[in-house]
Amino acid sequence: MDSQVIVALALSLVGGLSTSLGALLVILSGAPSLKMLGLLQGFAAGLMLSISFFDLVHNAINSIGFLKGNLWFFAGIIFFAIVVTFIPEPQIAPASEGKRKKENGDEGGKDMLKKHRRQVFYSGIVTAIGISLHNLPEGMAVFLGSLKGLRVGLNLAFAIALHNIPEGVAVALPVYFATQSKWEAFKLATLSGFAEPLGVVVVAYLFPSSLNPEILEGLLGAVGGVMAFLTLHEMLPLAFDYAGQKQAVKAVFFGMAFMSASLYFLQISLPEDMSL
């Protein structure tokens, strides 16, 4: 294996495995209440929307044009809207109804909590998939940056590591709440970070010979559409139910602002002739 690829893999592991640090923060702080879970789900939804609109779709439009970028984006939405019709989802009543049953000593309270946990776990899986797809081009950027010099690669890996910590939180939090398993939360958050070294492998061995740059940008735009759909379809309703609409919306915008700032500092760490 080429030494440059080995260096890039090592740097991408540093950046990617920082999702594990986010998982550790969740594990050490303990499982949150339903209201706190709703706020954090809103925050995670803001992260996902910011990645979708301000990163993936924005780059696709800049690279392949407004029309093609939008076509890929909405193709992703339509594709996953069809896919989710075949995915069984637990149907739950509002959180307030579950609390009322529990207060009345109804056995249905426990069943309602189990259904809430299934819904939250599903949301965690959705987040993990979205974060993994987002991390793939970051691994590509680490490889390209390391080709320009070790200093550039190190700076970029460090910036990505800081950028990925809240992503690890967004993945681990719902999984920990739903399963009460520290290992499951840590494992899923860590696996989402492994998309970064996978991105190094893709760009090192596929990109030069067979991966059309325009197709790649289009696919990433479609990923942005998938992430936007899943966020609005799965995560926001959960945040509204648990935290209330007003509080959840505030959390969403806070998450968007946080990720936008993170993307900005990540972007300025890149050389001028590179983009993420």
Image (cartoon, rainbow, N blue to C red):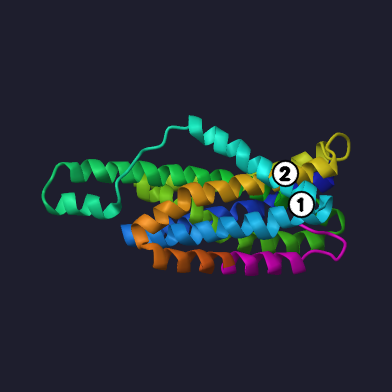
Residue 256 in view: yes
Specify the segment rendered in magenta: 257-276
Q: Can residue 14 be found in the magenta stretch?
A: no
Along the line of sight, the residue nearer the viewer: 141 or 1: 141
Helix, strand or loop under label 1: helix
Q: Position of residue 143 (x, y in %)?
A: 79, 50
Q: Can residue 271 be found in the magenta stretch?
A: yes
Q: Which mark is residue 44?
A: none
**What is the crowding at mark 1: few (fewer than 14 residues within 10 Å), some, or many (at least 20)?**
many
Along the line of sight, the residue nearer the viewer: 94 or 159: 94
* Residue under the image location 35 percent in, 40 percent down: 91
Q: Position of residue 238 (x, y in %)?
A: 40, 52
| Amino acid on which the number 1 mark rests in the picture | Ala
Left or right of 117, for residue 106: left
In whole angstroms, how far apart are the C-alphas of marks 1 and 2?
9 Å
Q: Which mark is residue 60?
A: 1
* Residue under the image location 57 percent in, 55 percent down: 48
Q: Earlier in the sequence, mark 1 or mark 2?
A: 1
* Residue under the image location 44 percent in, 42 percent down: 122
Q: In the rendered image, which quarter contains the N terminus?
A: top right
Tell me the mark number nearer the camera, choosing from 1 and 2: 2
The residue furthest top is 86
Q: Which mark is residue 72?
A: 2
| Amino acid on which the number 2 mark rests in the picture | Trp
Residue 220 in view: no
**What is the crowding at mark 2: few (fewer than 14 residues within 10 Å), some, or many (at least 20)?**
many
Q: Position of residue 24 (x, y in %)?
A: 46, 56
Left or right of 222, for residue 168: left
Left or right of 83, for residue 31: left
* Main secondary structure found in the magenta portion: helix
